[in-house]
Amino acid sequence: MNGSFLRLYYLKFHKLKQGKSVRSKDMVIRHAIETRRQLNVCKNDKVRFRVVCLGSNLTLGSCERKENQIVVVKTIESKHTCLQTREVSLCTISWIAKEIEPTLRVNPDIPLRSIQEMLQQKCNPGSTCKIDIEPEANPSSPTRQFRRIYICLQGLKEGWKLSGREIIGLDGCFMKGPYPGQILSAVGVDANNGIYPVAYGIVESECAAFCDRQKGIIPALARMFPNAEHRYCVRHIHENMKLRWRGLAFRDLIWKCVRAVTPQEFDVAMKEVYKENKDAHAWLKEIPPRHWSRSHFSGRSKSDLLINNICEVFNKQLVGGRDKPIITCLEYIREYLMKWLVSVKKIIAKVDGPLTPTIAKRFEFTKKAASNYRVFWNSETKYQLQSIGANEDQCIVQLDKKTCSCRKWELTGIPCRHAVACIWD
């Protein structure tokens, strides 16, 4: 039984006081439908409440009623040995009738097909789908026109919460068919440093957190996510800079500022920009460095991503559906996400060890570089390192806090070569 089931029981039963009815079995039916398991309430009295899986022959949940009649979950077992089923015996005709009764009272003439679709929509509980239509009907049409839709599937939502890095790129691409609009996407980064689509939508026009510095998105993000760090796509900053200052020199200088990992390195790089062109330096100074330079990024997201290519990779996969009608396009995106999840699962299934393939390869290079340092123990978890050779490189590592003065461990969440050298010592 997954964690959501445990939370479901605790939240539902925690507030039940003496004299109120207990709808325990109804929750079991809903969970049986969600997980497609043959569940059964084998004990439901004044003292105990127990649920078992008939296919696995195991006890899923055991609850105890206290003196104040509050039900508390005591044990949880989550290892099923049975296969999922398409027919859940607890989902009886009487239960379905209770489910659709409120809808029938409001709309007695609702077609049977609509009732079936309504019930089928609940097969993916937790998914979010918001549809916006015109506030008033078109004078030439009795129905109101579609404006925009937002979709976030439960599987993607939960997967990103469990394994995704705390970074999301925002971008959009134009639809090419007879129905103008844009596909907006929110794409994250998974544990393998690959793309992880989180949510998507279709809008009539771009409704302006990676971005092209569109006006309106900064106050919107500040209002919805006041504690979130907002980064700009450096490639777009460079494109805007090229409108006034062209040449490889400016390109190299701006990327030197971007890749600086400490404030001191950033200041040195900005001085080089000042020597090259004072106006370009003043233009860059107007952009707060916390939005575009690694030197001012926090380590919360465990990602040093500088460009919004994660969204561009996702948008490229949608080319085949962008010229289709809206519903067909949405179905194209859903099928792509389904195939993408399967392919990622196959890759991870072949992995030996705790590291994902991309991180494992990166770690091999890190280990080779770590052999070029002398390690000096400073205290319990502090170390000083000095490189071997003419190119002197000195850093301070604190293993318990997972920090290094080079800041790469803090920014990426992956031990840098200095940290690896200390761990080996």
Image (tube, grey):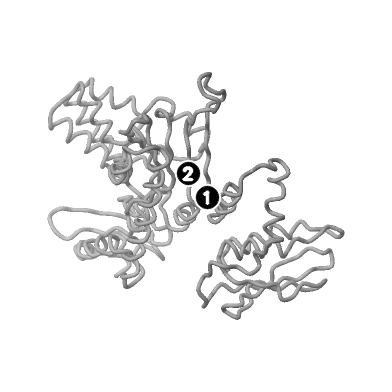
State whether residue 283 is above or below residue 162.
Answer: above
Is disc 1 placed on a helix, strand or loop? Answer: loop
Crowding at dot 1, Cα within 10 Å, few <14 / some 14-19 / many 20+, comes out as some
- Rendered location of residue 256, percent (x, y): 22, 38
- Apparent side of residue 382 relative to residue 94 in the rendered image (left or right): left
- Quadrant containing the N terminus in the rendered view: bottom right
State whether residue 143 is above or below residue 309.
Answer: above
- Rendered location of residue 24, percent (x, y): 73, 64
Residue under the image location 39 percent in, 43 percent down? 328
Which residue is outermost to the bottom?
57
Residue that badge 2 annotates: 151
- Rendered location of residue 364, percent (x, y): 23, 65
Q: Quadrant of residue 416?
A: bottom left
Residue under the image location 34 percent in, 28 percent down? 287
Q: Is residue 262 visible?
A: no
| Mark 1: amino acid | Ser
Residue under the image location 64 percent in, 64 percent down? 91
Q: Which mark is residue 1?
A: none
- Quadrant containing the C terminus in the rendered view: bottom left
Residue that badge 1 annotates: 127
State whether residue 122 is above or below residue 254.
Answer: below
Which residue is outermost to the right?
19
Is disc 2 placed on a helix, strand or loop? Answer: strand
**Is there CB contact under 8 Å for labels 2 and 1?**
yes
Crowding at dot 2, Cα within 10 Å, few <14 / some 14-19 / many 20+, comes out as some
The one nearer the camera, 389 or 63, is 63
